[in-house]
């Protein structure tokens, strides 16, 4: 970690003021891959929309999306980061963490180390970073409280870490979790976990505003709404039946047994009047993970 820190400090001294962003690489999971925003039988997503608005008129941005469905923080370090560094990006999105919370082996310390390594390497090589805090899957899916609370607890820990690493690596941060996903259902896709096309546009517009506020010369912001008509109900149902259910099946075999155990422990703690203990333990684990970075 010392070598990473040295590289980061040196880059901070040499980095020029905000300028044009000519190479943009996106790392992350299905949210950044673009699920929920289908165009021409492929996923587009907020990162691609933002890339189209980064360059002033007459210029172009080289955009590469390395994100893929199911990716966890460890996948960024081992698989996506080497490819990203080879592209020498000036802007790099690192938006991940939701899938970590959906695994039985969730470990906030490991997630913290992986995120810090990825962000540290990209920053050390001169990239401006984009980060985000994400909403917890339990609230989006409206799971029963005994199941939702453990997921919310994990997501809070991940977001706490992301906030701290945003400061550590001077990233541009968007509070995606605070966007009105539950109040405005049209912002969510049919699976209730990913943004809809309009939701992706909303994320892209917010990032554009943050980068403009940081002094980067940009093109016009992304449109507020997609030009393409949204998929019809039949198309949504077909996608869920043919592709969306794969995620459900995968998580049922991975997450569900552990989540049920967490829910049982949650219920037992509530009966003893100690339901806040698990929150305190997770918050303490996140704080210790961050303290271990030095």
Image: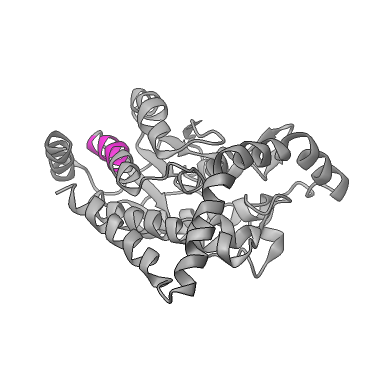
- Residue drawn at x 63%, y 51% is 193
Left or right: residue 109 versus residue 217 is left
Magenta stretch: helix, strand or loop mostly: helix
Q: Nearer the viewer, residue 56 or 223?
A: 223
Left or right: residue 171 versus residue 212 is left
Colour style of the rendered protein structure: one colour
From the top left corner, tell me how far across and down residue 98 is, in percent. 49, 48
From the top left corner, tell me how far across and down residue 55 is, in percent. 47, 42
Left or right: residue 139 versus residue 242 is left
From the top left corner, tell me how far across and down residue 159 is, in percent. 39, 57
The answer to which quarter of the image holds residue 145 is bottom right
The answer to which quarter of the image holds residue 252 is top right
Which residue appears farthest toward the bottom when viewing the image?
273
Residue 174 appears anywhere in the view: yes
From the top left corner, tell me how far across and down residue 253 is, in percent. 61, 38
Q: Is residue 78 magenta?
A: no
The answer to which quarter of the image holds residue 9 is top left
Left or right: residue 234 versus residue 265 is right
Count every numbered label the image shows and give the total: 0
Up-down: is 67 above or below 137? Answer: above
Up-down: is 293 above or below 212? Answer: above
Q: Nearer the viewer, residue 102 or 233?
A: 102
Up-down: is 275 above or below 207? Answer: below
- Residue drawn at x 45%, y 49% is 218
Dividing the image into 4 quarters, which one contains the N terminus? top left
- Residue drawn at x 25%, y 33% is 125
Up-down: is 173 above or below 240? Answer: below
- Residue drawn at x 35%, y 31% is 77
Q: Which region shows up in magenta?
A: 116-124
Residue 46 appears anywhere in the view: no
């Amino acid at each position: 970690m010392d070598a990473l820190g040295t590289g980061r400090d040196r880059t901070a001294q040499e980095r020029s003021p905000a300028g044009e962003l000519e190479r943009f690489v996106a790392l992350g999971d299905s949210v950044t891959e673009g699920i929920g925003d289908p165009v021409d039988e492929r996923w587009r997503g907020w990162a691609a929309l933002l890339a189209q608005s980064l360059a002033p008129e007459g210029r172009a941005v080289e955009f590469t999306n390395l994100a893929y469905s199911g990716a966890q923080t460890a996948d960024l370090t081992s698989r996506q980061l080497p490819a990203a560094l080879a592209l020498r990006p000036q802007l790099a999105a690192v938006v991940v963490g939701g899938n970590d919370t959906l695994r039985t082996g969730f470990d906030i310390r490991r997630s913290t180390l992986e995120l810090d390594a990825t962000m540290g390497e990209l920053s050390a090589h001169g990239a401006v970073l984009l980060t985000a805090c994400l909403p917890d899957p339990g609230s989006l899916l409206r799971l029963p409280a005994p199941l939702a609370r453990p997921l919310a607890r994990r997501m809070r820990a991940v977001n706490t870490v992301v906030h701290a690493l945003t400061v550590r690596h001077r990233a541009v941060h968007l509070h995606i979790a605070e966007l009105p996903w539950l109040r405005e259902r049209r912002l969510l896709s049919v699976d209730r976990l990913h943004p809809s096309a309009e939701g992706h546009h909303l994320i892209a517009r917010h990032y554009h505003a943050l980068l403009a506020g940081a002094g980067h010369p940009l093109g016009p912001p992304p449109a507020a709404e997609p030009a393409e008509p949204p998929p019809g109900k039949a198309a949504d149902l077909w996608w869920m039946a043919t592709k969306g259910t794969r995620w459900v099946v995968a998580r049922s075999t991975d997450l569900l047994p552990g989540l049920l155990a967490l829910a049982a422990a949650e219920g037992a703690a509530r009966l003893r009047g100690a339901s806040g203990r698990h929150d305190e333990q997770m918050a303490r684990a996140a704080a210790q993970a961050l303290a271990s970075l030095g």
